[in-house]
Image: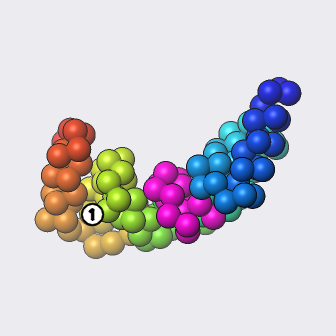
């Protein structure tokens, strides 16, 4: 417990100094209650800070929050927007989630051609998924 608080404290200090990974990690701490009181809205805020500054993992986490309605109102369109940002930067899980969004029409109109494009990009990065 003490170690968790120390870890969260270090991440907070690094985040306040502008470290994007630490900002994302603060989001994880709040999402999971590691060294801080679990608070999904605060987790989202930390993810958003890092995502806005270009952190690919935080961008994925923001997308997940929107997709699940975790700490923020559920919004498939905003989720897809963030998945696409991370997917364009090469995040394979975001590419897979873009496949699913286009295939199912979540946050956008159903578009199997776009789903297939993202499926190919994910496959080129080593992810194999059937849709």
Residue 99 pos. (x, y %) = 26, 56
Q: Residue at x 36, y 51 (%)?
A: 91
The answer to whether residue 111 is left or right of residue 78 is: left
Residue 116 pos. (x, y %) = 15, 57
Relative to 107, say whether 97 is above or below: above
Residue 50 shown in magenta: yes
In what quadrant of the picture does the N terminus appear? top right
Residue 114 pos. (x, y %) = 19, 65
Q: Residue at x 32, y 62 (%)?
A: 88
- Which span is picked out in magenta? 49-62
Structural crowding at the residue carrying mark 1, measured as other residues with C-alpha within 10 Å and reported as few (<14), some (14–19) or many (≥20): many
Q: Residue at x 75, y 35 (%)?
A: 7
Residue 47 pos. (x, y %) = 61, 57
State the residue in front, 35 or 31.
35
Relative to 70, say whether 48 is above or below: below
Q: Does residue 64 show up?
A: no
Residue 33 shown in magenta: no
């Amino acid at each position: 417990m003490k170690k968790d608080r120390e870890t969260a404290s270090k991440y907070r200090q690094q985040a306040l100094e502008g470290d994007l990974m630490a900002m994302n990690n603060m989001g994880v701490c709040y999402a999971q209650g590691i060294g801080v009181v679990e608070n999904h809205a605060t987790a989202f805020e930390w993810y958003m800070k890092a995502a806005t500054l270009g952190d690919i993992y935080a961008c994925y986490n923001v997308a997940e929050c929107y997709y699940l309605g975790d700490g923020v109102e559920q919004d498939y369109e905003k989720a897809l927007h963030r998945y696409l940002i991370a997917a364009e930067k090469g995040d394979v899980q975001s590419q897979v989630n873009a496949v699913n969004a286009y295939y199912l029409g979540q946050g956008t109109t159903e578009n199997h051609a776009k789903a297939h494009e993202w499926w190919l990009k994910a496959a080129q990065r080593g992810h194999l998924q059937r849709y």
